[in-house]
Structures are given as structure tokens and as C-alpha cells.
Amino acid sequence: MAQENQVETTGLMGWIDQRFPLTKMFKEHMSEYYAPKNFNFWYFFGVLAMVVMGLQIVTGIFLTMHYKPDAALAFQSVEYIMRDVPWGWLIRYLHSTGASAFFIVVYLHMFRGLLYGSYRKPRELIWLMGCGLFLILMAEAFMGYLLPWGQMSFWGAQVIVNMFSSIPYIGEELSIWIRGDFVVSDATLNRFFAFHVATIPLILVGVVAGHIIALHHVGSNNPDGIEIKEKKGPDGIPLDGIAFHPYYSVHDTLGVAVFLFLFSAVVFFGPEFGGYFLEYNNFYPANPLQTPAHIAPVWYFTPFYSILRAITDEFMFRWLVPFFGAYAVLVLLTTRSLLAKVATVAITVGLTVGFFIIDAKFWGVVAMFSAVMVLFALPWLDRSPAKSMRYRPRWHTVVLGVFVVVFVTLGFFGVQPVSPLGTLLSQIATMCYFGFFLLMPWWSTLGSFRAIPERVVFRAH
């Protein structure tokens, strides 16, 4: 361990340190936190996520000063912000563009975890917290999506909440409880506003703090997937580590500057981003008597929405039943655990029977939520001897690339109107999406792995 600096602070800082461990926290998390020296481009996105979160909180505070959470006034209050509040249009566009930017950097941050095995031991809890943050962020975005009270906001919320009605026995009551009414109404708007501006942000900030504390406790991963704490010098400092401050705090300013440049270009020149960031139907006030021709969620929900729409009766019996049957056989032939065998048979039989007695709409909801929840199991699904894709067989990188293409494909068809070809391709992509995770215990161990170096490989960039 590095020797703690015994020099006491004086003046105002000394007065604060006697009452709050400010200097101690700064050292633990900045100047004496040693990060791997081989961070690359992919490690910008964690910091960028924090930057966007701060932007969303600040702009959100200013928007609530003028927004009216009332079904009769909400849309007009947004128009008032855009047209009459000084710089209100900028604050609104910063917030709406920031929502999409948040998901962009989070998706790229998660991809880096897949690329370099950041979810592997000893960082399982960090990954679980990160997946929890993803769920919280989705809830925050969904609640905020209703607040402009435009056509797409209203009908998108109607469709999403109605999905819960497909749950047997409790579905209808659950949907009414979420809405606070039999339809999306003023009661729904008020409770969504309360959750969006108070409850969920508090939870989000708390989990982010826990995520960072857990990260700094076990140390950051790196592109080589090597634990730098295992190689320390006589002073207790990792041989392949450098202090986060000032080295990475300055280094990250490059990523922040580039991000802000691109972000500002979108805000000032294309805040609607072709209707993906702000749908054109949302510039019309909500009308419960006029349904839009095509209802689709915002782009960052569309991969999971596409999975929801892909589940049909024909798909279940033609694709899912044979898949689960073959998967059960694979597990029975390759596992030695009697408990695993019994659980596999029970789950397969239960799902097959459930397909016959419960409507496909319910299984679509189950598949949509399972597409997110499977991420939580990733640390235990990946059994590769190497964390990073750098030292795995080349075809493992191809598999990850195919997964990315599948995810983008699902997102694309999620914003398109339903069509036979789109449904078929979405169903194929859905099978590939779940196959990537469910077959990972086998494919992640196959192939010829390259030798993992004892020390990190540093490449200047």
C-alpha cells in the first residue's frame, strides 16, 4: 500500500477536513486511485455518462420551473418554454437530446464491458449495479417520455402500460394501478412527473455512487483483462498503474470536448435527429380520440420492443419449442449436475405447457423483459479463460460483432411498421440475441486462446 500523506491541511481546507473527509476522499478516488495505464478510447464513456447525467439533472431543474404537470396545461407549458422563456428552447433541446445521448454512451459503455470482460471476477457486483442503472435509466426515460403530452407521448405510454394487462390474473388491475385511472390521464401524468423529477433521480444518483465506490474498491479493468493489483512495486503502487488525477482527469477532457462538440452540433442543427430523438407526432397535443398511424417507442427502447412484437403463436411453436427442446438436450448431455438437469427439464416442460395455455402477448412481454434481465447473468454465463477479446480466438470477436448487428437490426425494425418481412427478420434476430447469451457457456470456451501477458500491453493513442 502507498504510504498515506501525513501532512495535515491548514486554513479553510484544514477546517473542512476536521469535519468532513474531503481531502481523504479526493486521494482515495482521484490522486491516489491507480488505474491501468493502457486505457483507450472505450474508457471515455463512463465519464461521459456522468457528464450527461449532470446535464440532465441541471436542465431538468430549469424545465420544472416552467412545466405544468396537468393534462390540460402540459403541452402548452412545453410550448411556452420553447417560445417565451428566455433560452427555454435551448434548455428543452439540451434535455431531449441529452436523453438520447445518455443511452448512446451507456450502450457504448456496456459494449466495452462485453469487449474486455469487465463483468468477470472480481467485478461481478459492479456489472450488476451497472445493469441495475440501465433498468433505472429506462424507467426514468419512460416516465419522462409522457411529460410533453404530445401524441406519441400519450399513445406510446398507453401501449407500454397496456402490456402489463397481458399478465394472467393481475394484469388489468396492475395496469390500472400504474396509470392511476382506466386510461392514461391527468393522474398518470402527475405520478409519472413525481417519479421522473424526484424518486428515480435520487435512486439513480445513489446507485451511481455505489457503482463508482465498488469500481474503485476492486480497481478498473483494462483492455488486456489483467489485474494490475497483482504486480506492485516496493511502495505498494501497481507497476502498471498511474494516478487517475491528474493523468486520466486531464486525458478524459479530450473525450468530453469531442462529445460536447458533437452533442452541440445535434442540439443546434438537428435536435429532432430525423424524428428519432423527437418524433414529429409529438409536436401535436395528445388526442385520446385520434390514434397515430404508427406507434413506436423512442429509438433506445426499440430493440426490446422489436422482441416484444416478434413473439407470435406461430413463432412460439415453430421456433421456440424446438429451440428450448434442443437447448435442454444440450444441457442434459454436457452438465454433470443433477440439480441443473432437473431444473432444465422442469423449465422446458413448464415453458412448453405455458405456450399452449397462455396468450403470445404475455410471452412477448416476458421475452422483452428477459432480453434485459439476461444481462445480469452475464458474469456466470461467460466461461472463457481470457477476459478480453484480445486474447480470445478471432471468431469470438466475429460472434460479438454479429450480436451488435443483431441488436441494431432489432432496433431498426422496432421503429418500422409491422410487415411480414420485418416480422420474420425480427424473429431471426430475436433467436440470435438470446442464442448469444444462452449458448455462451459453450462457445466462450471453444477455440485456441492466445497467451495472456503477465503485464499490461501499453499502446500510446
Image (cartoon, rainbow, N blue to C red):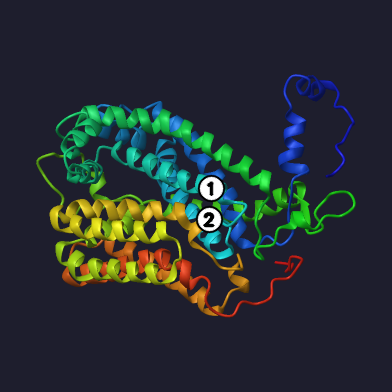
Q: Residue furthest left?
A: 289
Which quadrant of the view contains residue 407? Answer: bottom left
Instruction: State left or right for residue 18 relative to residue 45.
Output: right
Q: Name the amino acid type tagged 1.
A: Ala
Q: Is residue 117 above or below residue 125?
A: below
Q: Is residue 70 above or below residue 332?
A: above
Q: Nearer the viewer, residue 445 or 31?
A: 445
Q: Nearer the viewer, residue 319 or 403?
A: 319
The percent position of residue 51, horizontal first and vertical second, equals 56, 44
Instruction: State left or right for residue 270 relative to residue 181.
Output: right
Q: Quadrant of the C terminus?
A: bottom right
Q: Which residue is mark 2?
A: 109
Q: What secondary structure is marked by label 2? A: helix
**Tag 1–tag 2 contact (CB < 8 Å):** yes
The percent position of residue 394, horizontal first and vertical second, equals 55, 79
Q: Nearer the viewer, residue 190 or 332?
A: 332
Q: Nearer the viewer, residue 317 or 282?
A: 317
**Count of residue discs:** 2
Residue depth check, mark 1 versus mark 2: number of the one nearer the observer: 2
Residue, x 69% and y 62% (percent of image)? 226
Q: Name the amino acid type tagged 2.
A: His
Structural distance between the alpha carbons of marks 1 and 2? 8 Å
Mark nearer the N terminus (1 vs 2) = 1
How busy is the neighbourhood of tag 2: few (under 14 within 10 Å), some, or many (20 plus)? many
Q: What secondary structure is marked by label 1? A: helix
Residue, x 13% and y 39% (percent of image)? 288
Q: Which residue is mark 1?
A: 49
Q: Which mark is residue 360?
A: none
The percent position of residue 110, horizontal first and vertical second, equals 50, 56
Q: Quadrant of the N terminus?
A: top right
How busy is the neighbourhood of tag 1: few (under 14 within 10 Å), some, or many (20 plus)? some
Instruction: State left or right for residue 102 relative to residue 221.
Output: left
